[in-house]
Image (cartoon, coloured by chain):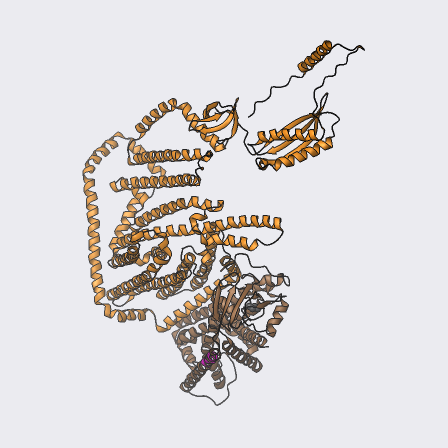
Amino acid sequence: MLVRLAALLLALMLHPGFASAQVPPHLAQGAQTTSTETAAPAPSANDVQDLLRILGDQRVVDWLRSAAAAAAHTTVDEEGSTLRAAIQHRLAAARQRMGELTQAWSSFPLVPSVLAEAWRSQLSPAEALRSLTYVIIFLFVGGGLEWLFWQYFHPTLVRIEHTVPTTLMRRLSAAGARLFLQALAIAIFSIGSVGAFLAFAWPGFLERLVVNLLLGVIAVRALATLSRFLLAPVFPALRLVPLDDRLAPKLHRWNVFVAMVFVASLLISDTLDVLAPTASDAAQARSAALAVSVGLGATTALAVLAMIWSMTPRIMRDAAAPRFALGRLEPVAFRLLPVAQSLVVIIALLLWISGARELMWTVLIVGLFVPVTMLSRVMIDHFFDRAEEAAAAEDHRRDAEAQAHDATAALAAPGPAPGVADDATAPAHASPPSALVTGPGAERYAMYRPIVRRLVRFLLAIATLFALAAAWSTDIFVLAETPTLAGRIAKVAINVVAVLLLADLIWVWARTAIDRHLAGYVAPPPGEAPGPEARMATLLPLMRNILLVTILVIGGLTMLSSIGVNIAPLLAGAGIVGVAVGFGTQSLVRDIVSGIFFLVDDAFRVGEYVEIGNLRGTVESMSLRSMRVRHHRGAVHTIPFGELKSLTNYSRDWVILKLEFRVPFETDLKLVKKLVKQVGAELQADPNYGHYFLEPLKSQGVRRMEEFNMVVGVKFMARPGAQWVIRRDAYHKLRDAFEKNGIHFAQRNVKVEVLSDQPLPEQVREAVAGAAHAAIESRARHAPVRDEP
Amino acid sequence: MVRAVRIVSGLVLFTYVAMHLVNVAFGLSSIEAMDAARPYFMGLWTNPLGSLVLMAAFLAHFSLGLAAIYQRNTLRMSRTDAVQILASLLVVPLLTPHVVGTALAARYGIAPSFASLIPYFWIWAPEEGLRQVLLLAFLWIHGCVGVFTWARVQPWWSRAGAFLHPFAVAIPVLALLGFVSAGNEAIRALDAEPAIAADTASQADAYAMDEGETEYAAPAGEQRSRGEILAILSRVNWTVFSLYLVVVSAVLVARRVRLAGDRNTVRIAFAEGPDVTAPAGLSVLEIAEQRNVAIAHLCRGRARCGTCRVRLAGGDATLPHPTHEEAQTLARVGAAPGERLACQLRPGPGTLVVERVLAPYVRPGDLHRTHPAPLPAPAEGNAA
Ligand code: FES
């Protein structure tokens, strides 16, 4: 029904003749003259040149000065007098209106006869019948064209209506496309009927009558389409408001009914207004017309009231209740809301009757603002809930599909399919929205919900402001340009409101993003090292506060400057302090900032083994400024983030380790390969580290030949963390296996050929061996063994 | 057989109305043009054979329509069906004065022309003009619904359909505009020369009882006074009208009586939609329509198109055997066993699980393009 009121408002706006017809002429004139004063056309370039030339003349300047000084006293008076005049105008208008109303009241019994007489003078019965014929013909023409249109587009419409949209965007675009098609159909209908009407020439009053009838049909249809767009009485998938299948059609019917009453009253009073001046006793006819239009206005208000009392409590109970957690206030709110709405309608009606058009608009607009804001909020929530459900269902379905795929692949049986299907459908309606925020799709929506809410509220506020300004027939922007007090206030108000709303929007967006990150953080169970999120969790609130302060400062400064305070000294002072502090904390800031970036890069986490320059060790903890790395022999390095140039992380994803054995040339390589494979399988079966393997231990064959032996390579790939243990065990087991199968590792045995037939004495032999050894040793200088944990 | 008679008689009547309207459309040029074009358009029907055919077609169509109303198991129907039935019911009272007038005119030897009738409709008896316009609107709507429902499942439709639609609109629109413009011409003539116009007035008065355009020769010596003829006319009109009311209400009462017997209910579970309970005796299509479950029905339940077919997936309701027509259509569209036409299947009491075979939004074009291969399956997730 809020929607309904909005539509009513819109229709009223689109039909200025309705309301303005009731405004006393001199008042309307007053409004017009003020608007012409404010909206003067821009001067031409030549005029400006002339003005500049004249202003250059010192005498003129002096004269202007003196004149301005004299005028300064009078302006205040003038402002006061215009205000007084306006009030007097209004009072006079009200008095006149009262007179008219009493006259209308007294002539009420005469209404039928007076109007019938006027009607007859304008239109013979034959002509009346003929105009009916015309209207039917034109409607037929319009209807025929529309039918033609649907012949080509109806299947599209059905397709839209019967495809359930899966995402928010698709839902909106489906509803929009439907509205577009229907609006197009109405447009074609209007073009057909009005076009056929325009093709003929008509006598005055008949023309007005026929046009009004046609317009009435078109207006009702347009309003009904709008209501259908929002409520989608038959197609819940396209519904834009959170109503169920019972309420939506009911509300739609009410909407159509009220639209009909409203349009009919509008058109009847318009027709009578045209008819009245032509009557023989114009004054009487006019007051009769006034009486009728007051009666019709009351009828419309009654229809709206009936709708409010029939629908609002039900809607509050069924649809809105779970959304407004009002606690104990709820029953009161339920009872009060229809009363408040009725009050708005009744006051608006009374104001309209008494001719205070601006006041009526003000009441209507202000009365509408709260419910429309509420409605928009509920609608947005509805959208996002549906979208999240759909996204969650989609995510779930994908998971289920993947699972089913795996399962079928493993079992080669269609067994799990029904169970999976059950799983997929269950969460869509079983779990509350908060529990649905699981997949990436659903999460995306949670992020935007508050932003959209704010944005819509922002737009609504602006629209209300403009509507109010339009009701009082002032242009805010033009007003803001004028140097009067009101103008200045308007200007400041515009700036302040804009700054506030923008700041609010930015703040909400940032806060949502940060809070969402924080909500995703789960503290590690005691005893386990926290991940990088832990650091984020400490950093984010800090960032949030910094942002809040920044926004507050910038917003405050902007507002101050728009009020007219000179903020340059403030800025300069703040700048000096900032520079001083900045110099002092330069390296600190560098540490913090580069720390943030290392975190963003996810370069290391607590518990990982890293190498920084020539320092190595396990990351033990991080602070805002520095990280702490413990060497495997116990030393602790504290490294400020700012000092980090590059960092090597040994604990990421996978490591490959290559082992080498030296075996004699005569070794059976096939046997080696087999043995390695065996050992690999054994290692993989180990309960302690078996699961670390990504690729099992395998032989790479001979890697190179050396003087006395071959080098056989063996490698494995594992997750970081257990590689050293695995290496140890691999050596161990390989040696045992080789030993068992008669393969001996090659040993460096130096053969010294002595070119002499006599046996060498023991001492000499030793001396020779020692010399040879030294010679070989000196040649093969091994690289220092790496220090590893 | 019934189907054939209905469509043939309907087509005859439709052609007649269309030609008549084209004739009226000449009013856009002038009243003389209307009269000049008249022999070419109406000659076919004003000879005895033509009027005999017309009469027979009307009677056949009318009685078949009443029979169809009698056969209906529910009066809650789709919007198109409702429009068609209401239009047809309204046509008869609107048409009676026209036909009776024609008959009387023939009897008393008055030769009407557009030149006398247009001023009559627009100036001297505007209510008659209004009646004519309404008659045309209802006739044309009824005819169009019927003809298009029949035509769009025909094989030639996919090629010709798009071109025929504009005609369906252009003919009545042009006729109506011709009617308006002729009327304006007559009114202008009256304003310009009241004396001459008064002459046409007396002339028109003489023709007051006549709205037909037949041109029989006057049987000699049967001149009666105007008042007498008018009295006969209104008497005949009222008699026909009350007779008509009696017949229609008799049909409705008979239908009530026929339905009073069975009060069982059937529960139908639609595969992608809701479970519904409905009185037994309705067709599955009718039940679906009442509950907003979309099922394609290009021929609007005439067992011609086969787009409404559903797969029966269980349930214990008793199912009547397919009628000859249904079996024929099922065979033609190559339906799998276990599929039936929703528009023909009237399940007895019990439960039934059905599943749509086609998407609810098939177009007539899809019908023949993919035939006899299966039509596009319903898009997934088409829940109601
Ligand atoms: S609707 Fe065409 S066969 Fe049933």
For ligand 1, the image quadrant comes to: bottom right
Q: Colour of chain B?
A: brown
Seen in the image, is A309 located left or right of residue B356? left
Q: Residue at position x 30%, y 40% from top?
A: A491
Q: Colour of chain A?
A: orange
Q: Which residues are magenta?
A: B249-257
Tell me, yes or no, whether the highlighted magenta stretch contains residue A384: no
On-image quarter of the N terminus of chain A:
bottom left
Q: Residue at position x 65%, y 16% from top?
A: A781
Q: Nearer the viewer, residue A164 or A30?
A: A164
Seen in the image, is B11 located left or right of residue B222? right
Image height of B157 relative to B108, above or below: above
Return the x and y of residue B87 as percentages of the image width and height.
Answer: 47, 73
Does the image show residue A43? no
Q: Nearer the viewer, residue A598 or A297?
A: A598
Seen in the image, is A139 located left or right of residue A400? left
Return the x and y of residue B355 as percentages of the image width and height.
Answer: 55, 63
On-image quarter of the C terminus of chain A:
top right
Image height of A749 relative to A716, above or below: above
Q: Nearer the viewer, residue B350 or B294?
A: B350
Q: Residue at position x 23%, y 33% from top?
A: A65
Image height of A288 relative to B72, above or below: above
Return the x and y of residue A603 as percentages of the image width and height.
Answer: 50, 31
Type of secondary structure dominating the magenta stretch: helix
Seen in the image, is A260 located left or right of residue A678? left
Return the x and y of residue A284 as percentages of the image width and height.
Answer: 24, 66
Residue sitting at the far front: A762
Does the image show residue A784? yes
Q: Nearer the viewer, residue A694 or A676?
A: A676
